[in-house]
Image (tube, rainbow, N blue to C red):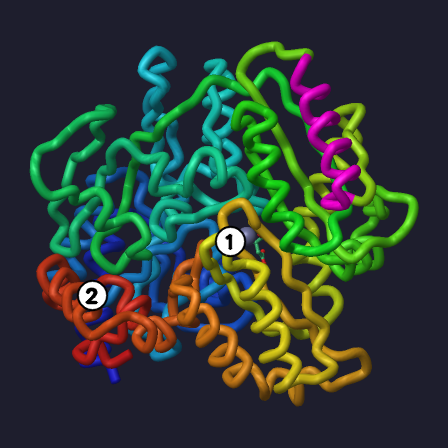
Amino acid sequence: MSSRTPATIAAAVERIRAVLGPAGCLEAAADVEPYLVDFRGLYRGRTPLVACPASTADVAAVLGICHELGVAVVPHGGNTSYCGGATPHDDGTEIVLSLRRLNRVREVDADNFSMVVEAGCLLAHVQAAAEAADRFFPLALGSAGSCQIGGNLATNAGGLNALRYGVARDLVLGLEVVLADGRVIDGLSSLRKDNTGFDLRDLFIGAEGTLGVITAASLKLFPRPRTVETAFFAVPDIAAAVQLLARMRAATGDAVTTFEFLPRIAVELTARHVPGVTDPLDRPYESYVLCEVATSRDDPTLRALLEAALEEAMQQGLALDAVLAGSLAQRAALWKLRESVPEAQRAEGASIKHDVSVPITALPRFVTEATAAVLAIVPAGRLVAYGHVGDGNLHFNVSVPLGEDAAAFLANAAAVHDAVHEIVRRHRGSISAEHGIGRLKRDALARHKSPVELDAMRAIKRALDPKGILNPGKVLPEPDTGH
Ligand code: MLT
Ligand code: ZN
């Protein structure tokens, strides 16, 4: 249980009201409601106040008050977390801190290939601001229209271009962070090289708001892709996809930006549930790859290179059929198919989800072993294992068997997670490749990290947040937070 008394929480709320004014405080039930439930509907919490500061100084003031009074704060971005990382607990003692009003692009420096943005900018807004300066910000997520860059960084999001450009962490030059006690680290450097001791920046990326609140970031930009070719092809299995990735990278001068694996069922579910999605090929196949190659120059040879690589793959039986997008509309249709898989799986009913990674070369064995392990527990479970093969990251999901009751199926979730995660461990993989830990995987994290790693993480947490007010009960089980 939380040790904060109602009087202490009321005092914090009153002082925050005085700092932020009515425009910065949401308290009416209807206004607060969207902040209480996570994206997947797994958690529902309560809060006395959603604080919506409009500046870094205001964030600092809110945290200063909460630190002084020992009141917990839950940072909140676009609420697209899959792990409940931004949802308050249900004891009503935690103040939600929405970053949505910190939404300015502070600077775009095209010649330095960098930009400085505030945490509450929508990812789509960041991408558009880069494009307006003839530059490219490559983080690409299906939720770009609703997720915020601060949340992307706090959770170290991965997405669809990580193969070529890296994950969110790799795209950051510097951060502005408000510490638990309200002090501000102004680390908004735009330097590529800065070899001056501990890298504090990387502590806050992926920490999900448990070590500090990211208020702004200096981001890396890239030349804008000018030639983009998109192919959708059938492959016999994931082993062939892995082999093809290496070949495509070599054949196209390492121009592969996306290499996504889809099993047949993903095509069937999207065609069934998402209006406008159809199977791009004339007959069904076991598995598919959506591959995109891009260069920053006008390059009429790129398509020919891709076609030649696919033709060779077909001769060798590594690819079975293929279609290349011939227009922007066809490209958009292929992307829609890929990006709608989570939505289609949701529409199909209950699912047990995983976000795992293993070394790319271990993917085929991982899939064989994990499939057997899952079917031993849920024999009629429908495997929907799709995702970022180029990063060794699969969403190894299981949909409810046809006709089976959701609750009965979900009762197997813990056993299925344990079985899959044990195979991940054997392959030295990760139980959360890109979705983070939040509340959902907190206990799994504690089982999968070594005692030494957990000790080091706890020591850092204690050093930066000695009162445990920042997003308690997320990422690390902290004995002194009550969660
Ligand atoms: C994806 O790759 O589509 C997402 O990370 C997984 C999901 O939304 O379930
Ligand atoms: Zn993903």
| Numbered disc in front, either 1 or 2 | 1
Q: CA distance from mark 1 to mark 2?
A: 42 Å
Q: Which residues are magenta?
A: 301-319
Is residue 283 left or right of 24 when viewed as pictured?
right
Cβ at disc 1 under 8 Å from ligand 2? no
- Residue 359 position within the rendered picture, expressed as x and y whole percent measured from the top left: 45, 55
User: What residue lies at 72% left-to-right and 73% top-to-bottom?
Assistant: 382
**Residue nearest the observer in this picture, 219 or 249:** 249
Helix, strand or loop under label 2? loop
User: What residue lies at 15% left-to-right and 65% top-to-bottom?
Assistant: 456
**Residue nearest the observer in this picture, 140 or 280:** 280
Q: For residue 150, what is the image quadrant?
A: top left
Ligand 1, seen in the image, is in the quarter at: bottom right
User: What residue lies at 38% left-to-right and 53% top-to-bottom?
Assistant: 155
- Residue 399 position within the rendered picture, expressed as x and y whole percent measured from the top left: 69, 72
Look at the picture and state if 318 lies above or below 353.
above
Q: Write down the residue under mark 1.
A: 361
Q: What secondary structure is the magenta-colored segment mainly?
A: helix
Q: For residue 289, what is the image quadrant?
A: top right
State the quadrant of the N terminus: bottom left
Q: CB under 8 Å between callouts 1 and 2?
A: no
N-terminal of the pair, mark 1 or mark 2, is 1
Q: Write down the residue under mark 2.
A: 469
Would you say residue 376 sits in the magenta stretch? Answer: no
Viewer can see residue 69: no
